[in-house]
Amino acid sequence: MLALDKKDTTLFLIVLAAVIFAPFLLNPFPEGSELAQFNAGYPDLLQRFLIFGIFAIGFNILFGLTGYLSFGHAAFLGVGSYAGVWMMKLLTMNVVPAILMSIVFAGLFSLLVGYISLRRSGIYFSILTLAFAQMSFALAYSVLTPITNGETGLQLALDDPRVLGVSQVNGSIPPTNLFGLPMRESFELTMGGWVFTFNAGYYLCAVFMMVAFYLAIRIFRSPFGMMLRAVKSNQQRMNYTGLNSRPYTLAAFVISGMYAGLAGGLMVAMDPLAGAERMQWTASGEVVLMTILGGAGTLIGPVLGAGFIKYFENIFSKINDNILHQWFAFLPDGLEDALVFVIHPFIGKGWHLTLGIMFMLIVIFLPGGIVEGFRRLAQIGRRGTGGGKKSADAVPAPAE
Amino acid sequence: MSGLKNINRRTLLKSTAAVGAGLAMPTIFTSSASASYLNEPTGSTVTLGFNVPQTGPYADEGADELRAYELAVEHLNGGGDGGMMNTFSSKALKGNGILGKKIEYVTGDTQTKSDAARASAKSMIEKDGAIMITGGSSSGVAVAVQALCQEAGIIFMAGLTHSNDTTGKDKKANGFRHFFNSYMSGAALAPVLAANYGKDRKAYHLTADYNWGYTTEQAVRESTEGLGWETVETVKTPLASTDFSAYITPVLQSDADVLVLNHYGGNMVNSLTNAVQFGLRDKQVNGKNFEIIVPLYSRLMAKGAGENVKGIYGSTNWHWTLQDDGSKAFVKSFGEKYGFPPSQAAQTTYVQTLLYADACERAGSFNPCAVVEALEGDSSLPGVSSPSNKGYLFDGLGNGPTLYRAADHQCFKDVLVVKGKENPSSEFDLLEIVEITPVAQVWYEPDNPQFAGGALGTCNPGA
C-alpha cells in the first residue's frame, strides 16, 4: 500500500490506528478513580505527544541516518513558532498559513545554519549547532524583543491587524481555527465512568503527524536514505570515491529543520504563544533524549521516546503529597507517612529524577531504546510459542 | 431516471449514513457548549489549580507560595484557626469551602518557563477541571498564563509578578493582580531616596535584560529624575549571568554616585555581592558616599545576599513584621503550621485565594464573568480623587485598605520601603520597614505611559 512494503505498511497502519484511537487508549482509568491521575488522554498532552513526535521524527532523519548529532534543533522549532504567531498576528487566525510559513522559515534558517555547520563533522558539528541555537535563544530572549517579545513570549493581542481575518470578536481574540473549525473545539464522550475527549486540534496534528511519518518511511527506504546511511558508516571513504556528500547531508539537515518548523507551527496552532525557552539548549537536548530513549535510527522509536518524556513531564510533575496520602490512606498512619516520605523525592518537582533513572535504566539495559525492548519482548513471545524453531531469529538485531 | 435506477440497498445505506453523519456533525462540535461556563463544578467539590515554580531559579518562592495556598485551602474549608478570614473586611466566607463546595486543589510546576507553565495550566483546565488558576513567580510566566486563562475562559489570580505589563499592556479581563508593580516601587522609593541621599545624585543602572528589568528601570529612572537625579548610564545584563564583575568595573570609572540594581532573585544576590566586594560602598564620589539601591526586595533574596544587604534600600509588597491585625493573624497561623514566617510571595498568594473565594461567595456563582463583576465592585479608595478610583475595596488582609481597580484589575495599597537591617535579631529578621508609603502617592491613572497599550477585553466564561 502507498508504495510501502508489507512490513512498513503494517507499521504505518498500527501507528495510524494508535493515533486515531489514542483518546481511548490513553484514558484507561475511569474518571474519579484514584488511578485517573495517570490518564493522559486530555487534548493538550495528546497534541504534545504528536507534535514532539514530529519533531523527533525529523531529528531522527538527520541523527539516525547520517549520525550528525545536532544540539541545536530547538532553534528551528522556535523560529517556526515565531513565524507562525506572526502569521496569526498579521494575516489570519486560520492555522494553514501559520503552519506553512513555519515550515518555510525553519527551512530557510536551517539552510543557513546547515551550510555553515556542516563544514565540520562529529563533535565540532554538534558544538557549532549548539552555538547557533544558543545565539538564537539569546537573540529571542533580549536583543530581538521587538520581534519576539523577549522573556514573556510572543502573544496575540486584541489590536493585531489580522488583515484577512478579524482583530477581535466581542472583545476576545478569535480562537485559532481551520477554516472556521476552532482548534480547541472538543467533543466529550461519556461511557460509564469514562470520559473520552476528542479534540479538533489533536486530529489536525494527527493528519500532519501521519504525513510526516509516511515521508520519513519513504526517506528511510529511498536511495537518498541509503546515501545518508553511507555517510554515517564512513563519510571519508565516500569522499575518496569522488562523491561529494555535503549536498546529501545538507538536504537531510534542511528536511529535519523543516520537520522542526512544522512542529513549531503546530504548537502555536494549538496554543498561540511562542516563548524563547523553546530555543534553549535544554529543549535541543530534550529531542536528543527522546530519539535515543525511543531508539535512534528506527522509524517509530523517536515517537515513542517523545511520548515517554512528555508523559513524565506532564503527569509525574503533577502528583503531590496530598495525592500520595489519598492513595495510601488505607495503610496505618505510620506506614503511610513512611511510604509518602520514600516516594516524595520522585514525584512533583522530582519528576526529573524519575525520568533520569528511567533514562539510565533504558540506556544501560536496552541500548537500542524502547524499540529494542519491544523487539526483545516479541522474541520472547515467538520463542514461547514457536519453540525456537528458527535460531536465526533469536540473534538480537543490532541497535543502530 | 437512470440515476434512480442505480439506487440499490447498499448505496441507499451508504448515503443515509453520510447524511446522518453530516447532521450529527454540528451537535458533536457544539456539545461542549451545553454548560453555561467552562468547568462548572457540579459535584460537592470545586478544584483550584496552583501553578507555581517548583524547579528553576524561583523554586524557593514557589515552595512558599504552595505553602500559603495549602493554608488558604485549609482555612477556607473550615480548618485551622481561620487566619486572615477573621480579619477580612468582607464577611461572605463561611469556612465551608466556596459556595458550600469543599475546595480541592491540583498543583503543577511552571519551571519558570512560559511554555511549561502553559502546558501545566492547560492540563489543570482540561484534565482536572480547575475553575481558577493561580500562581507564578515571574512576570513572563504570569503574562503567558493570564493570556491562556483569558482564551480558555477561566479566572487567573496572579501570584508574584512585579512587571508593569501584567496589568499594563498585557492586562486581561479574566486576570487579577494583588501584588504591587514597578511603577509603585519607583514612586514609593524615590522620595525616601531623595530625603536620605539628597536631590543631586547621579545614578547608574544595571538592569536584568528582560521585560521586568525594563519596566523597573523605567519606573525608577522616571521617579528619581522627577526629583532631580541624573541618570548617567543604563546597562543591560544577561539574565543568566552569575558574575557581574565585568559590569561593576565601568561603574567605578563613571562619575555616578548611586548604583541601582534592577535585578531579582539569584541575579540580585550575585550582583549585590559583586558590588560590595568591589568596595563600592566605601567609595566617595563627588564628595558623597556611594550608595546601592535594589528596587524590589524579598526576604528570601536578603537571606541569600547575607551581610551585604545591610543598609540598602528597596521596596516590598508586604513584610511579616507588620503589626496590623491581618498580618499578625496570617503570620501566626503560617508560623504555627510551618515553623517560620511567610514571605511576601506567600502573603500575596494567600490573599489572592481568599479574594477569589470571597468574590465567588458574593457573586453566588463560579461563573468567571460573575466573579469578574464581583471583583470589579463599585466602591472607591478614600483619599484619592480620580475618575478611575473605582473597584472593589477591602481591608484586613495585611496591606491596609486596598482597592482592586476595575479599570485594569490591579490592586492599589500602601507600599513598603525597606532597608537591610544592621543588627538582625534572627535569620528571618533581615529587613526593617523605613516607611509605609501611602497609596495616594503610588496611584497612577490607567493610561499612564508606562502602562499604555493593551486592553482588558471582555470576560470570557469559556462556553
Image: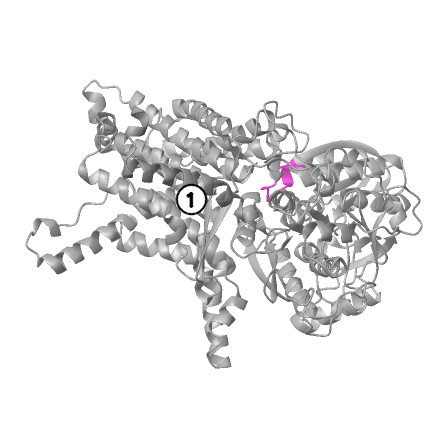
Residue B216 x %, y %: 74, 40
Residue found at x 70% / y 58%: B365
Residue B239 x %, y %: 61, 41
Is residue A258 left or right of B65 when viewed as pictured? Answer: left
Residue A120 x %, y %: 35, 27
The number of numbered discs placed on residues in the rendered structure image is 1
Residue A370 x %, y %: 29, 50
Query: Looking at the rendering, in which quadrant would you find the N terminus of chain B?
Result: top left
Residue found at x 50% / y 44%: B27
In front of the other: A185 or A131? A185
| Residue to which mark 1 is pinned | A286
Q: Does the magenta stretch include residue B242?
A: yes
Compared with A215, A198 (above or below) is below
Is residue B389 left or right of A330 when viewed as pictured? Answer: right
Q: What amino acid does circle 1 point to?
A: Glu
In front of the other: B11 or B438? B11
Compared with A315, B451 (above or below) is above
Element type at mark 1: helix
Q: Residue furthest top?
A: A242
Which portion, as a residue range, is magenta? B237-248
Is residue A333 left or right of A259 when viewed as pictured? Answer: right
In front of the other: A238 or A383? A383
In front of the other: A371 or A241? A371
Residue found at x 19% / y 45%: A398
Decide if residue A365 is in sight here: yes
